Image: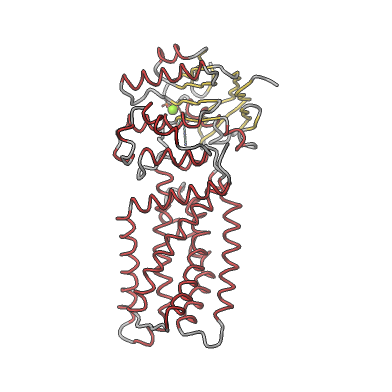
């Protein structure tokens, strides 16, 4: 079989009258790390959400490890984790409770949670409701959730935003580790220097088109 | 390995009940709202004890219905707030199990509310019961009714969270669908309160059971297409 992790085939995505993505084709090999750049509104988030199967393409198709993200949604999603602009947390629950929920859904034991919270430097705040977290702390918790899944493909939508320098360094270290471990990475970011250090190649979007 | 359907259902129920517990201030506002509704109905009716007794079941269900709309839209507000439901579905959790979990948690919440409202109703509308068995029968009717409200309510709340005017859309979609449920629940409640001399309550209860089967099955089947764009 092909060593293709993600295959984007002539995909266009329309929101109302606006085309967010136009005839985009892209192949990403397993183990590859790709940086996705482009100005605000160029379609980076849209492309990542399509890859995760969270939104269906208006035209074209996407495959993740040879599974169609719409028709074989469950199977395709098993391979993927997405760090997105939205935190994905339940604000009324604590950091640990949010992770415990996801561990239960993933069928993982909860042993790793303490370690993960330490890794993102939230162990002291493990029992604080997420509503009382700062923006950067929420981002760290989202990262811990992505780490918990240990997916074959990591989709990162601006992972450096909102983080302090220490947090950014932590994320860089983690991405570098994942890269070494053979995880496929798609990294959408405006932090060009960090992105270049962490990726094999760069893909640029302008007004929903690959250039 | 991903969680089974059952494990997912349990995780979602636990999560929702935990959120209810953490936000119990909101919960007590809901209780206060339904008690106030019962009080208002009794004021509106005036002092005719017999009329109040005759219609006690109807007012109980109106109170529960209004409270359920508030509870259901709140249950999906927490899902939409940070796109938390999306994160859950990405794990990838089976959307059908997520539906069953949320609908069950909503039903349990309404059942708790019902258990609090029934004694209020007995006092306010001067309804007497003969012993604990009679009370248990009444609670069984309440349970069947709230489960029949929660199943379509959870599905429609999921549909309306993405709409612009969600607070209006939910009751507009839900109330017509619940007319038969409400009718059966009110009849059964009235008969059980009156002691059911002719044994007619059974017919209405069977109808409630049938509504439950249909609505839970529909929700189970349709929920995935509602949450996946
Ligand atoms: N849910 C939506 N409804 C309507 N239009 C949308 C929606 N999401 C995105 N768009 C539009 O699609 C286009 C691409 O948006 P997208 O979020 O993918 O950009 P982006 O490259 O991620 O930008 P940023 O760098 O600001 O994160 C924009 O024109 C935006 O207005
Ligand atoms: Mg974006």
Looking at the image, is A210 positioned above or below residue A94?
A: above
Q: Position of residue B208 (x, y in %)?
A: 56, 70
Residue B58's image quarter?
bottom left
- Left/right placement of residue A6 relative to residue B53 reads right
- Left/right placement of residue B201 relative to residue A146 reads right
Q: State ligand 2's quadrant.
A: top left
Q: Nearer the viewer, residue A133 or A43?
A: A133
Q: Position of residue B36 (x, y in %)?
A: 31, 69
Q: Position of residue A197 (x, y in %)?
A: 44, 11
Q: Nearer the viewer, residue A160 or A178?
A: A178
Residue A152's image quarter?
top right
Looking at the image, is A10 positioned above or below residue B185?
A: above
Looking at the image, is A205 positioned above or below residue B87?
A: above
Q: Position of residue B148 (x, y in %)?
A: 52, 64
Residue located farthest toward the right when viewing the structure as drawn: A1
Picture residue at 48% right of the left edge, 76% below the top: B137
Q: Nearer the viewer, residue B56 or A17?
A: B56
């Amino acid at each position: 079989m092909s060593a293709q992790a993600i295959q984007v085939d002539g995909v266009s995505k329309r929101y109302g009258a606006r085309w967010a993505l136009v005839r985009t084709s892209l192949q990403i090999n397993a183990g590859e790390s790709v940086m996705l750049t482009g100005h605000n509104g160029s379609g980076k988030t849209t492309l990542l959400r399509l890859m995760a199967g969270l939104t269906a393409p208006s035209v074209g198709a996407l495959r993740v490890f040879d599974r169609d993200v719409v028709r074989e949604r469950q199977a395709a999603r098993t391979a993927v984790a997405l760090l997105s602009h939205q935190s994905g947390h339940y604000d009324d629950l604590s950091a640990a409770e949010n992770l415990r929920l996801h561990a239960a859904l993933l069928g993982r034991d909860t042993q790793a949670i303490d370690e993960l919270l330490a890794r993102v430097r939230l162990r002291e705040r493990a029992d604080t409701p997420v509503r009382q977290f700062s923006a950067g702390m929420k981002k760290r918790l989202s990262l811990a959730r992505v780490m918990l899944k240990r997916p074959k493909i990591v989709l990162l939508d601006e992972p450096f935003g909102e983080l302090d320098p220490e947090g950014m360094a932590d994320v860089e270290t983690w991405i570098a580790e994942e890269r070494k471990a053979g995880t496929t990475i798609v990294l959408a970011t405006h932090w060009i220097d960090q992105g270049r250090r962490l990726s094999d190649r760069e893909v640029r979007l302008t007004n929903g088109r690959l250039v | 390995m991903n969680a089974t359907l059952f494990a997912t259902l349990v995780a979602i129920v636990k999560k929702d009940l935990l959120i209810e517990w953490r936000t119990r201030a909101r919960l007590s506002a809901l209780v206060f709202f339904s008690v106030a509704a019962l009080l208002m109905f009794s004021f509106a009716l005036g002092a005719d004890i017999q009329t109040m007794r005759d219609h006690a079941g109807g007012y109980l269900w109106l109170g529960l219905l209004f409270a359920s709309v508030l509870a259901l839209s709140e249950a999906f507000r927490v899902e939409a707030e940070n796109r938390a439901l999306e994160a859950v579905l990405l794990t990838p959790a089976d959307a059908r199990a997520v539906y069953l979990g949320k609908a069950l948690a909503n039903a349990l919440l309404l059942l708790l509310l019902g258990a609090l409202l029934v004694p209020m109703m007995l006092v306010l509308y001067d309804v007497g019961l003969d012993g604990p068995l009679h009370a248990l029968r009444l609670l069984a009717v309440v349970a069947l009714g709230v489960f029949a409200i929660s199943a379509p309510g959870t599905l429609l709340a999921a549909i309306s969270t993405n709409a612009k005017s969600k607070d209006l859309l939910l009751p507009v979609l839900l109330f017509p669908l619940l007319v038969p449920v409400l009718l059966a629940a009110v009849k059964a409640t009235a008969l059980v309160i009156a002691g059911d001399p002719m044994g007619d309550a059974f017919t209405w209860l069977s109808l409630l059971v049938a509504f439950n089967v249909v609505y839970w099955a529909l929700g189970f089947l349709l929920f995935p297409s509602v949450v996946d764009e």
